[in-house]
Image (cartoon, rainbow, N blue to C red):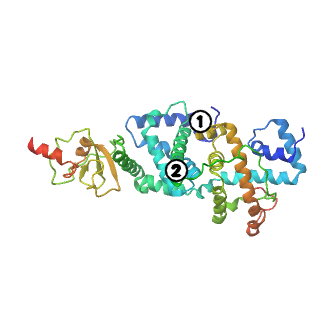
Amino acid sequence: MVVRCEDVWREVSNYLDGEVDPGLRAAIEEHVRECKRCTAVVDGTRNVIQIYGDERMGEVPLELSGRLHQRLGGNASSSRRGFLGWMAATAAAVLVAGGFEIARSSAFPHQGLRSEHAQSSADVPPDMMVIVAEHGKTFHVAGCPFIHDKSNLRTISASEAEKEGYTPCVRCMTKYLDAGATA
Amino acid sequence: MVAGVGSQGNPAQKDHEQRLIRRILGGEHEAFYELIRPYERRVYAAAFAILHNEADADDCAQEALLKAFRHIRQFRAEARFSTWLVQIVVNEARMRRRKERAERIEPLEKDKNEEGGYTPHDFADWREIPSEVLERKEIREKLGEALGSLGRIYREVFVLRDMERLSIEETAKALGISTSSVKTRLLRARLMLRDLLAPGFGGAWSNNLSFAKGTKPW
């Protein structure tokens, strides 16, 4: 079998991937031995694969690790929790936009009441999905403009929020509070 | 399915992932982080290959991971988790790209040369490139620029296949194209990159390099 330069250029990729049959492989190798141009093409293409396949190429243009971890993980000391925090924050945005139910997390510890001004929230439906902020004291409906700390939001059920010590927002949960007061 | 390269192809890895998925479905959402950790780079790389913008790729990768989490129940055990994940991010990135393009009213990206042959333009010899060349930031940037200058359809195949080491079949599946398209695009991507880089490695950049003559770094 005799191959021309054009055949080598057409098959160089398959050749380097080991995807050509033995006859063609031998013919390519024979041609390349005699052809300086094809030697440059085959060696150069092999170099491209080797160089870009190097782990260090992950840094450019894909400076991903640090940035992705930062955003997924929050901070290095609590990456998993931070990640879930991010998930829930995004889920909160999704809830606002479209009404998906997501990210009921039971990974967070039971806490005491966060506010000394806790009001009865008996009339908030226990399964209602609400938004809580990591350092906040109240729980909200999605999209409530009174969620001050928007950095670490979670979406959980009202009953879970209460277990964790959150109390209903007096603005967005007002109808439940009123109902509770008149009950 | 043809076995791919890397640890994601082995049965122990698959079992491990199945266990993690069961834990996630059982409510242990933290296990998701462990499940996706080996593939974060790949997810980002796929998003970057399509969007070619770090901030967009970051957003897209995160959105794709959230979608994977949300739809983990739909993952079928006979599939490979990594491929499923890459399919999600590819779809997400393409959706964003379509939206962006519709807003800018750009012509559809078509390359009539895709199926044709590719003739190398440069025959500079750069057989001996020392491995330490990649330690140089400016060289890595040149490589990044060269990759960025490829058309999207070539870049996405090249990134998945040659940088993320997916098999031809996995690349085809992740991108929703045929294996012969993968091969054709891969050939062009590799040859175009070689043409772009040969002048530098063949001369301009190597003037400053301490070549270790007679040895191949790989």
Q: Position of residue B62 (x, y in %)?
A: 47, 49
The chain letter for the residue carrying disc 1 is B
Q: Position of residue A149 (x, y in %)?
A: 30, 57
Q: Position of residue B61 (x, y in %)?
A: 50, 49
Residue with the mark numbered 1 = B10
Q: Residue furthest top?
A: B78
Q: Quadrant of the N terminus of chain B?
A: top right
A143 or B107: nearer the viewer? B107
Q: Is residue B73 left or right of residue A168?
A: right
Q: Earlier in the sequence, mark 1 or mark 2?
A: 1
Residue with the mark numbered 2 = B102
Question: Is there CB contact under 8 Å for labels 1 and 2?
Answer: no
Above or below, comparing residue B59 to residue B32 in the picture: below
The chain letter for the residue carrying disc 2 is B
Q: Residues within 10 Å of mark 2 (few under 14, many from 20)?
A: few
Q: Residue at x 53, y 57 (%)?
A: B54
B96 or A90: nearer the viewer? B96
Specify the amino acid type for callout 1: Asn
Q: Nearer the viewer, mark 1 or mark 2?
A: 2
Q: State whether residue A117 appears in this view.
A: yes
